[in-house]
Amino acid sequence: MTVTDAPAYDFDKPLSRRETGAIKWTMYDADVLPMWVADMDFESPRCIADAIARRAQDHSLFGYHFDHQPLRDLITARMAERYNWTIDPSHIVFLPSLVVGLNLVCQLYGGTRGHILTLAPIYPPFLSAPKNHRQRAVQVEALAVRDGADLRYEFDFAALEAAITPKTRVLMLCNPHNPVGRVFSRVELEQVAAMAERHNLTVISDEIHCDLILDPDQRHTPLASLSPEAAARTVTLMAPSKTFNVPGMGLGFAIVTDDALRKTMMTAMWSGTVAHSNVMGYVAAEAAYRGGQPWLDAALAYLRANRDAVTEYVRAELPGVAVTTPEATFLSWLDFRQTPLAADPYKLLLEKGRVALNNGKDFGKGGEGFARLNFATPRAALMDGLARIKRALTEG
Ligand SMILES: Cc1ncc(COP(=O)(O)O)c(C=O)c1O
């Protein structure tokens, strides 16, 4: 008899999430396979559940918890190790959600009826945050390069610069980019920083996907790490939420090196319009950053293979469809414009394939005729989802 070790992490394990109330699984009818909102159908690293259980056992009271110095220190060390970026621990502002961070920056620095510039297609809250504050989300479409079934996006710097008006106050950057999966290079980021400097823009750099770099030869560069000048005008948003599959724990953070920017932000937060983070969020984040790396390495290998499975399937089985091969994130961006589903891919996939993707239209300019697929799911479910897309196309 051969004895084989059980795998340390079993990402193939099917999980039953519907009865936990997970929004991904309860939004649609039971026969619909959900491949939309960005959480993973994988158990988080065990060290997180253990830390939460230990905290609940050892201190079964859950009072206010407005700060957590060990987490500040861990984040500071992480920035130095991973990005050679020296930050001061006191420059970290804890947030219950990064979407709150996007909204706060618009509210505080976007100006009355100001213009907020962003590269589209884009994660929908980048478009709603300016609207929430009666500002204008100015969308500049990224350059899409399509080669057969392969799709890749680039900045359109000339168009971005041309879209800047005297009312433009804030540039919202998403890096790595949701939904197109790009990890922007240092050279591209230097151009972004120079443009912000020329036009005196505050930058929100949403880097929530920075730990989910799929190819080992690529690296994430925080915009604010480029120079003290870039840091002074940037609010960097990060979180353990996507990385370790803990978005329900409500803990993210901003790194704000400029004292005045940070002070305004803190004052607004203490005004009562922003909830504080919950105590278990701090516990989860600390545990994840201390002990989650082996899990993350294994998850990234699994996600990389899933990403490649999507690309290969699209090339071989879905005629007319084009897809990004994301450099980061667990999200593929699919172009259905040259297929029978072009009129409304989201609706037709749901109706004919019983598979729920995100609607490309919600991502602003350049989203019409597209849909976003979350491939952070066991391989068998992923292949089922792709087969459902094929069915919808065939029936379409
Ligand atoms: C770019 C980006 N920012 C923010 C979020 C959400 O952050 P939070 O759940 O902390 O509000 C997501 C979730 O998918 C995202 O992709």
Image (cartoon, rainbow, N blue to C red):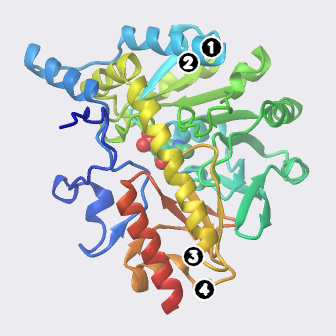
**Residue 113 picture location, percent across and down:** 68, 50
Residue denoted by label 4: 343
Above or below residue 268? Residue 36 is below
Q: Quadrant of residue 97?
A: top left
Q: Which element is circle 2 on?
A: helix
Query: Between tags 3 and 2, which lies in front?
Result: 3
Residue denoted by label 1: 259
Q: Give the residue at the far bottom of this rendering.
A: 395
Tell me which label, 1 or 4, sits earlier in the chain: 1
Any mark on residue 317, and which?
3
Horizontal arrangement in the rendering, residue 85 relative to residue 293 (left or right): right
Q: Quadrant of residue 43?
A: top left
Tell me which label, 3 or 2, sits earlier in the chain: 2
Name the kind of residue labelled 4 in the image. Answer: Ala
Q: Is mark 2 within 8 Å of ligand 1?
A: no
Above or below residue 104? Residue 260 is above
